[in-house]
Amino acid sequence: MKVFLNPGHDTKYDSGAINPNSGLRECDVAAHVGALVKHYLELAGCECELMQSDNLAPTSKGRSYYPDRQGLTVTETANEWGADVFVSIHCNAAPEAGTARGTETECYGGGDGEQLAGCIQNQLIDSIDTVDRGVKYMPELLVLKCTDMPAVLVELAFIDNDDDAALLVDRQNDFARAIARGVTDYEQAVEG
């Protein structure tokens, strides 16, 4: 199975959400968890590509950070590579910092994307002591609507909540293992 991993945001242009107390940045958490997911999926026999950029789709910012990719956006790169699944990794934030907790996995709609989201969400909730915010439909998200394969966006936890932020620092390996197991659960389900 070919898995395209997209750690959310970008260290240069858009760091994403930031914890107001510790300064923990979403882009850094996503990058580290993404690299670990790639490692675990490759150990499981998957072929992986990893790309962190906030240049998500042709309708977004139009910058190229990767000259070797000929200016392609994240979704164009995933589509051109022929990924079987697409997983974007993020940290959530609430309108009022610190007021929300938990993990959710977002998908475009029903079908294979929803099945992939469910497999990942189940593994995350079984592995980490977090609030289960469930699988949510988010058809307006560029990484979900501009990809040709089943795609999900995983919101690991709320980076602006200090309890969740502690999980994002201390349990990165557990988050990564759970995402990888969710992907392989999905692979087994569609092949079986």
Image (cartoon, rainbow, N blue to C red):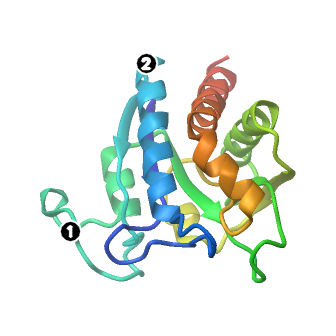
Q: Nearer the viewer, residue 175 or 62?
A: 175
Mark sitting on residue 71: 1
Task: Classify 10 Å Cα crowding around label 1: few (below 14), some (14-19), many (20 and above).
Answer: some
Going 64% across and 20% down the picture, which residue do you hit? 188
Is residue 52 in view from this perspective? yes
Residue 35 image-quadrant placement: top left
In percent of width and height, residue 167 lies at 68, 47
Mark sitting on residue 134: none
Q: Give the side of residue 79 with respect to residue 137, left or right.
A: left
Residue 115 drawn above or below residue 31: above
Residue 96 image-quadrant placement: bottom right
Residue 160 drawn above or below residue 121: below
In percent of width and height, residue 97 lies at 74, 77
Kindly identify which residue carries mark 2: 43
Residue 126 drawn above or below residue 158: above
Q: Amino acid at mark 2?
A: Leu
In percent of width and height, residue 73 lies at 33, 67
